[in-house]
Amino acid sequence: MSGRNPAMDAALSAQELERFQFVKNLREQTPAYLEYVEDRVTDISDEVAARKRAAFQKAQTDLGRYMDMEHNANYYKIRSGDVDRLTKVMEENNNKFAQSRAFDKDITKRQFEINEWYNYNKLETLFFLQVFFIVTLAAAIVIYLQKTALITSTMAGLVLGVLVIGVTVLGVYRYSYTRLVRDPRLWHRRDFGRAAKPAPAAKCDPKGNVVFDVEKILPEGANDITKCASKASEKFSKWLSEKEDEMVQYDADNQPPTSTLLGKGGMCTV
């Protein structure tokens, strides 16, 4: 082969010759040959055993890793379930706390309204008692002046009457206003009554016609409306009958005249 190094060929040839010479000398010495073969077999067996042992060790290590990964995955699954259950419990507790907070807020608000209502009611009662006390003192002064003849009995009676009428009117007004006009929930709000219920919506019968319950819409004038509707229905039926008669008369007036032709075969009407 062109381009090949001659020194390399010579080295390879010398290596092969040395190998052949070693084998020849080894085979001429039987004990040394057997010992060499035994050593080689032992080396090969040890090498194969070492490779098998290393492969088994690697497989054992990989299996341990896989088992650890499986255990970790199971642990993660259990931990995820615990976290999910804990989240649900926390959500339920939060909802309960929110409901309790809203309930407490409503209760507190209502209790404040009740306290405010009774507080102002007591203040108004105290105001009336104060007015009554002042009127009583004024009446006592008027009676004392009448007893000492500083004023006449007529004047005293007139003044006492005005005082009694004034305190009576004030008491009746405050009582009636609180009982009839004032809102029972909020003290500073007036009760204007309840709005009237809206009229019921129209309904549809099985045939699809719109039906109004006149008695529910206008319970007081239901009979009058029913009578008017009946009269309107009679007038409409009468108008339809008149129109039908007019159409029949129109057809009779515009019908073409008939003529009779005599022929050999008999009579023909046209």
Image (cartoon, rainbow, N blue to C red):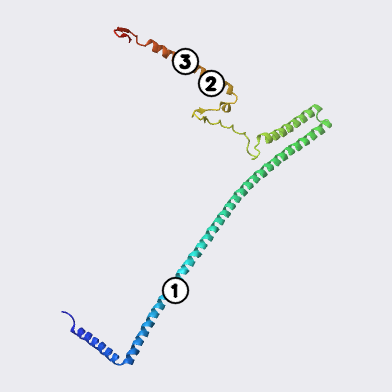
- Helix, strand or loop status at disc 3: helix
Q: Earlier in the sequence, mark 1 or mark 2?
A: 1
Residue 148, quarter of picture: top right
Percent across and percent down for residue 79 are 52, 62
Which class describes the residues within 10 Å of circle 3: few (<14), some (14-19), or many (20+)?
few
Which residue in the structure is indicated by mark 2?
A: 229
- Helix, strand or loop status at disc 1: helix
Q: Earlier in the sequence, mark 3 or mark 2?
A: 2
The number of numbered badges drawn on the structure is 3
Q: Foreground mark, 3 or 2?
A: 3
From the viewer's perspective, is 93 left or right of 143?
left
Q: Report if the CB atoms under discs 1 and 2 are less than 8 Å apart.
A: no
Residue 155, quarter of picture: top right
Percent across and percent down for residue 232 are 51, 19
Q: Earlier in the sequence, mark 3 or mark 1?
A: 1
Percent across and percent down for residue 231 are 53, 18
Please tell me which residue is depicted at 54% across the width and 58% down the height of the picture: 85
Which residue in the structure is indicated by mark 1?
A: 60
Q: Amino acid at mark 1?
A: Gln
